[in-house]
Every structure is written in C-alpha cells, then in structure tokens.
Image (cartoon, helix red, strand yellow):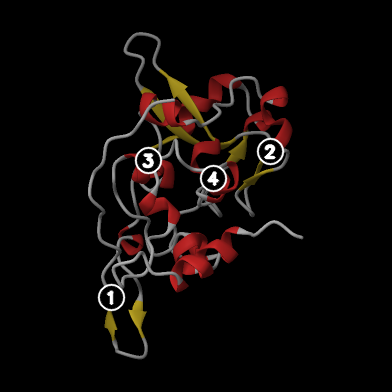
Amino acid sequence: MTRPTIKDRLDTDSAVADGTGREAEPFWRAKTLEQMDAEEWESLCDGCGRCCLVKLQDEDTEAIAYTDIGCKLLDDVGCRCRDYPNRQAQVPDCVRLTPQTVRAIDWLPPSCAYRLVEEGRDLYWWHHLVSGDRDTVHAAGVSVRGRVEAMEDDLPLEDYIEHMVRWPLRLPRGAMRRPADPARGRRTAAPPTVAARGTARR
C-alpha cells in the first residue's frame, strides 16, 4: 500500500467535515510548525529560492544584506537546490530550517511560508499548496528565476559587495493579490490571515 501524498491529504481534508458542517482546514492552517510531519514540512517550501542567495553580514552591526549571487548548489531556473539531501556537507554554512531557526533568524523573505505560518498568517495565492501548481511562484515574480546575476564560485569574494540588493526582502506588488479572474472579470483578494496562535516549542 502506497503512502498518501500531500495532494491526497488535501483532497481528503476538503472532503471531510470537522463535525460542524465546515470543511476541515488544510494542515498549514490547522497545525503549528512543530506539529507538522516531515512530508508536510518539506511541502511548505514554496520553491522561490530566495534563501539560497548569498547573504553578507556586517562585522560591526551584524546586519544581514542579500545579494543577487546564487549559492553554488542553486538551480537558478528551477529555483531548487541541486543536491538538497547533501547540501550541508557541501555548503557547511547552509542553514537548516527548523521551528527554532525560523523564529531565530530575521532574514527570511516576507513571503516565506515557514515565516507566514509561524506568524499566524495564511499562504499566498501563488503558493503551490494553494494554487496546485509549482509554476505560480515564478509567474507571480516571487522566485529568483531570471534575477540571479552570478553564482558564488564565479566571483571573487571582494566583488560580492557590488551585488547587494534589496528585492529579496520585498514582496512584488503583483504577488499580493490574485490575478484577474476571467470568469468574473475582476481581481480576487489574497487569502486572509489566520488567527495567531501559541506554539509549543520542541
């Protein structure tokens, strides 16, 4: 018997009422980060690739600045890691996201699904768990596709400062709201936020 996929779970959730006549909430609304299983956790990544851009830290202020330089393992078209299972062996300073690190680091993009869930907010319309399509993150202009100017092995370290950019910490205006609905001829609102909730630490 095969293990149910995330899509199977979502289809089941939409068909099962919670006892009050309402459809059951999808897992990212119903669970805290700690409560998610491994498959749910991995599926939460929207595939934007922003966290795979090289970041610089000021030695005096410890402020973090993004660059448009990609990690050596970043596939800048697919916006995925080329060797995800072994990424930390190849890139020792690669940060492994956990519920604790999501809370501790302040450089996660504002669109990051892990950050949104931790803050008690809903996923945007272009997230594949909402849209059902992994290409909507690119169509909405959220991913790094077409915006990576160099890979880290292609430049000397002293040139990195010339590639500092602000856009990875901003959400494109077009990503805030759903595109026009051709059936209705109007724009539809982005998903509402969900109520904030306490999280049980591991």
The amino acid type, in three-letter code, at marker 2 is: Tyr
Lower position in the chain sequence, tag 4 or tag 1: 4
Query: Looking at the rendered structure, which numbered label has been put on residue 180?
Result: none
- The 10 Å Cα crowd at callout 2, few under 14, some 14 to 19, many 20 or more, is few
Tag 3, which secondary structure?
helix
Answer with the quarter of the image where residue 71 lies: top right
Along the line of sight, the residue nearer the viewer: 200 or 142: 200
Answer with the quarter of the image where residue 57 lies: top left
> Which residue does the image show at 34% across and 39% down from the upper left?
118
The amino acid type, in three-letter code, at marker 3 is: Arg
Tag 4, which secondary structure?
loop
Residue on which disc 3 sits: 115
Residue on which disc 4 sits: 49
Lower position in the chain sequence, tag 3 or tag 4: 4
Q: Residue furthest front?
A: 19
Along the line of sight, the residue nearer the viewer: 138 or 155: 138
Residue on which disc 2 sits: 84
Contact between marks 1 and 3 (CB within 8 A): the answer is no
Distance from disc 3 to disc 2, alpha carbons, whole Å, reads 20 Å
> Which residue does the image show at 31% across and 70% down from the upper left?
22
